[in-house]
Amino acid sequence: ILILDEPEASIDIEREAELYSTLHAINKEYGTSIIIISHELETVMQHVDRVIGINGAIVFDTTPIEIAKNDDLLKQLYHPTCVTCEYC
């Protein structure tokens, strides 16, 4: 298992692409499970098979496709107690 905490922090977009390309190669070649801890959900969702959203507790455990289809998942993650706000 490889665990990375904010691996894309402080790198430019070109290096970010290299990073995710390298992680993909490691996963495919060695079968290594990779856990990425990140606030960059849009970026991470382009490169993963599974997303676990945590806000004090697990809010969702699903695929990037399901998150893209269901705005309520992100609302639950970022604004769990909100009934109506400028972000929802």
Image (spheres, rainbow, N blue to C red):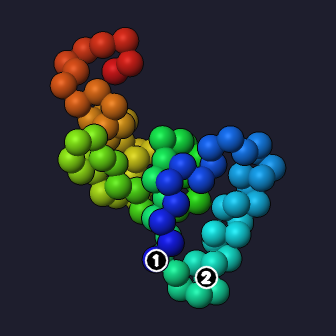
Q: Residue 13: x percent and y percent?
A: 76, 45
Instruction: Classify mark 1: helix, strand or loop.
Output: loop
Crowd class of label 2 (few under 14; some 14 to 19; many from 20; radius 10 Å): few
- Give the number of callouts: 2
Which quadrant of the view contains residue 46?
A: bottom right
Give the amino acid type for the residue marked by disc 1 in the picture: Ile
Residue 28 picture quarter: bottom right
**Residue drawn 81% across and 49% down?**
14
Given the image, on which type of amino acid does mark 2 rest? Lys
Residue 4 pos. (x, y %): 52, 60
Mark 2 or mark 1, earlier in chain: 1
Labels 2, 1: front one: 1
- Provide the residue designation for mark 1: 1
Residue lying at the far top of the rendered structure: 86
Residue nearest the viewer, comparing 19 with 59: 19
Q: Which mark is residue 31?
A: none
The residue labelled by disc 2 is 28
The residue sitting at 30% across, 57% down in the picture is: 61
Residue 53 in view, yes or no: yes
**Left or right of residue 79, residue 39 in this image:** right
Direction right: furthest residue? 14
Q: Is residue 65 visible?
A: no
